Image: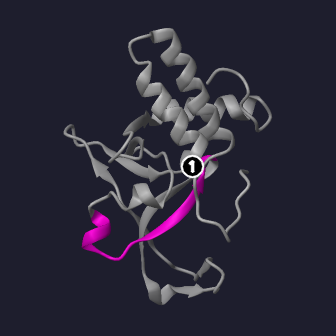
């Protein structure tokens, strides 16, 4: 699992930098593919992303250190983005600056859940088409099939994806 210090805000500067670089080389397919492999490696092995979630505050105990304990029968509703074809994507964010770009933040109280790759992969059900990282900024779409491929490469490598993803 990725290292996470709950006493510090979640940031993913290397992932953000890699996504920007990927957008700059879209005209060169080989360079773009190489850059996207670096992005995938960062997501799988090091990134902790943020997901917007609605939670029932009455079923949560604030631990006072930036963490919370969810009680039995707690429900977490993840904010989802719909596509024109009716499919849904889980929006994920590299940091709070990108979360604050989401219009839902202005319309309701939101919480964020930190998600390493293993949790992201486990959420890819038949109802999810994939994820979108920083949808109001870099807007990187990764399909469910791509996530499942990334997970299988990581599992085959003994928990650390080191080959091309």
Q: Image quadrant for the C terminus?
A: top right
Above or below residue 97? Residue 69 is: below
Residue 54 in picture, x, y percent from top left: 40, 72
The residue beneath circle 1 is 122
Q: Secondary structure at mark 1?
A: helix
Q: How many marks?
A: 1
Q: Residue furthest left?
A: 84
Label 1: few (<14), some (14–19) or many (≥20) C-alpha neighbours in 10 Å: few
Q: Does residue 59 appear left or right of residue 151 in this picture?
A: left
* Residue 161 located left or right of residue 56: right
Give whichever of 161, 123 is nearer the camera.
Answer: 161
Snapshot quadrant of residue 129: top left
Return the residue nearer the eye: 113 or 105.
Answer: 105
Residue 94 screen position, x and y as percent: 51, 51
Question: Can residue 127 be seen here?
Answer: no
Magenta range is 104-117
Name the residue at the right extreme.
158
Residue at image position (53%, 37%) is 17
**The magenta stretch spans residue 105:** yes
Residue 165 visible in this rendered orientation of the protein: yes
Task: Examine the structure image and report whether residue 94 is included in the region drawn in magenta.
Answer: no
For the point 50% across and 56% down, which residue is it? 95
The image quarter in which residue 153 lies: top right
Q: How is the image coloured?
A: one colour
Identify the residue shown where x is 56% and y is 32%. Answer: 39
Vertical arrangement, residue 159 with respect to residue 28, above or below: below
Give the percent coordinates (x, y) of residue 21: 49, 28
Q: Determine the residue positioned at 60% across, 79% down.
A: 68
Q: Residue 164, image x and y in percent?
A: 65, 20
């Amino acid at each position: 699992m990725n290292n996470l210090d709950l006493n510090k805000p979640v940031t993913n500067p290397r992932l953000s930098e890699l996504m920007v670089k990927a957008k700059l080389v879209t005209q060169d397919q080989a360079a773009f593919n190489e850059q996207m492999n670096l992005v995938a490696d960062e997501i799988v092995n090091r990134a902790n992303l943020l997901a917007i979630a609605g939670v029932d505050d009455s079923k949560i105990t604030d631990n006072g250190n930036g963490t919370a304990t969810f009680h039995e029968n707690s429900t977490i509703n993840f904010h989802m983005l719909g596509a024109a074809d009716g499919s849904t994507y889980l929006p994920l964010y590299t940091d709070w600056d990108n979360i604050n770009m989401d219009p839902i933040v202005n319309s309701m109280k939101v919480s964020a859940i930190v998600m390493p790759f293993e949790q992201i992969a486990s959420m890819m059900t038949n109802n999810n088409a994939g994820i979108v990282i920083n949808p109001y900024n870099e807007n990187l779409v990764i399909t469910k099939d791509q996530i499942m491929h990334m997970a299988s490469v990581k599992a085959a490598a003994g928990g650390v994806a080191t080959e091309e993803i």
